[in-house]
Image (tube, rainbow, N blue to C red):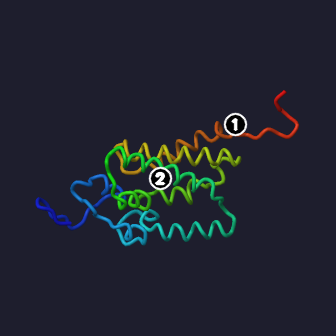
Amino acid sequence: YKSSHVIVDTVSQATPLATLKIRDLLKDFHSCKNLFLGNIQGTIGETSALAILIGAVILLAFKIIDLKVPLTYIGSFSVFLIFYMIATGNTDVNYFFSEIFGGGLMLGAWFMATDYVTTPITPKGQLVYGCCLGILTAVLRFFGPSAEGVSYAIIICNLVVPLIEKVTKPVVFGKGGRK
């Protein structure tokens, strides 16, 4: 990247999103195509959205995972991201896709958040869990000191799963109905 003040050949960061945090110095550092295909430096599992999506399709084909958690996770994060971009006056579509494809969002949504042990069992609980993950990831990513937020969001939401299960537990037929 060439600017009038600084010439930067490369940047050493934990994830591609860490580079996005210093946008003023490195504007347009990554193209969305490179983030999607994996032609960038970064932590394994966070650099190629295409490879993650191929793995997700395999898990879906073998019915190992369900779409509820990953789609509500990525969807709620995307909605928060759109509102954040509007609030900050950022209309760059590349920024939107860089936030989606860069970092651990895709890996966390398709592989970590769908873990059998920590994911809610109830369908409503899975939707609540996915929304909580997306919102918490966005809050941690945009307002926190770190460029990431996925791992912290998953840990925090895993702690709340018993409460989500209790609140979204369906009523057994013939029991607890309204009078």
In the picture, measured across the screen, residue 11 lies left or right of residue 177, that is left
Point out the tag, 1 or 2, that comes first from the N-terminus: 2
Front residue of 65 and 24: 24
Q: Is residue 142 left or right of residue 58?
A: left
Q: Amino acid at mark 2?
A: Ser
Of tags 1 and 2, the one toward the viewer is: 2
Circle 2 residue: 78
**Secondary-structure class at tag 1:** helix
Q: Amino acid at mark 1?
A: Lys
Pick the front one: 148 or 79: 79
Residue 108 percent location from the top left of the image: 51, 56
User: Where does residue 165 sit, x and y in percent of width and height?
Assistant: 68, 40
**Furthest residue toward right:** 174
Q: Which residue is mark 1?
A: 166
In the picture, which quadrant includes the N terminus? bottom left
Label 2 sits on a secondary structure element that is helix
